[in-house]
Amino acid sequence: MSTPDLPSAMTDAQYREAVNAALARIEQSVDRWLQEDVIDIDSARTGNMLTLSLPDRSQLIVNAQPPLHELWLAARRGGFHFKLDADGRWCDTRSGEEFFALLSACATEQARTSLRF
């Protein structure tokens, strides 16, 4: 599924709020896993970029792209671009896959243990 390259209807403030909520959700998941001793993941946030370093030294990088109103994910599987849909879900601009589902799949592959954000 492909999404058309239409101008974003959301304001910059709405975009920032959505990005901050997504990054906070990821950070909360990582904190919970550390507290419950599920997996030792190091997270580092610089502005709107969040780097997750897994035990095998691989990384997942989530980065906001304000000019495009997109959220990007870099993983071993590849690079992905997401736009917020009308239902408030970040969806891949090529496949339509939901961000947290794809992030969970990539994290599970790289960590070799089931992880769900």
Image: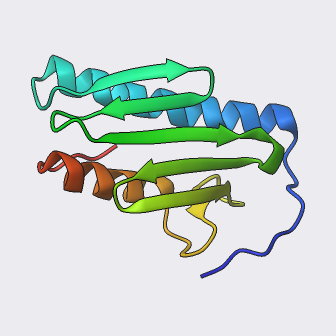
Say if 98 sits above or below 22 in the image.
Answer: below
- The location of residue 75, given as percent across then percent down, is 39, 52
Depth check, front residue: 25 or 47: 47
- The location of residue 97, given as percent across then percent down, is 49, 68
Depth check, front residue: 55 or 2: 55
In the picture as drawn, the residue positioned furthest to the front comes out as 57
Residue 81 figure quarter: bottom right
Q: Which quarter of the figure is the N terminus placed in?
A: bottom right
Q: Which quarter of the figure is the C terminus placed in?
A: top left
Q: Say which residue appears at 16% left-offset and 26% top-offset.
A: 40
Residue 58 placement, left or right of 93: left
What's the image's color scheme?
rainbow
**How many discs appear?**
0
Q: Say which residue appears at 36% left-offset and 32% top-offset.
A: 52
Residue 25 placement, left or right of 47: left
Q: Say which residue appears at 71% left-offset and 74% top-offset.
A: 3
Say if 101 sits above or below 44 in the image.
Answer: below
Say if 50 sits above or below 94 in the image.
Answer: above
- The location of residue 26, given as percent across then percent down, is 41, 34
Depth check, front residue: 61 or 105: 61
- The location of residue 78, given as percent across then percent down, is 43, 61
Residue 90 placement, left or right of 50: right
Residue 21 figure quarter: top right
Residue 32 placement, left or right of 49: left
Q: Say which residue appears at 87% left-offset and 68% top-offset.
A: 6
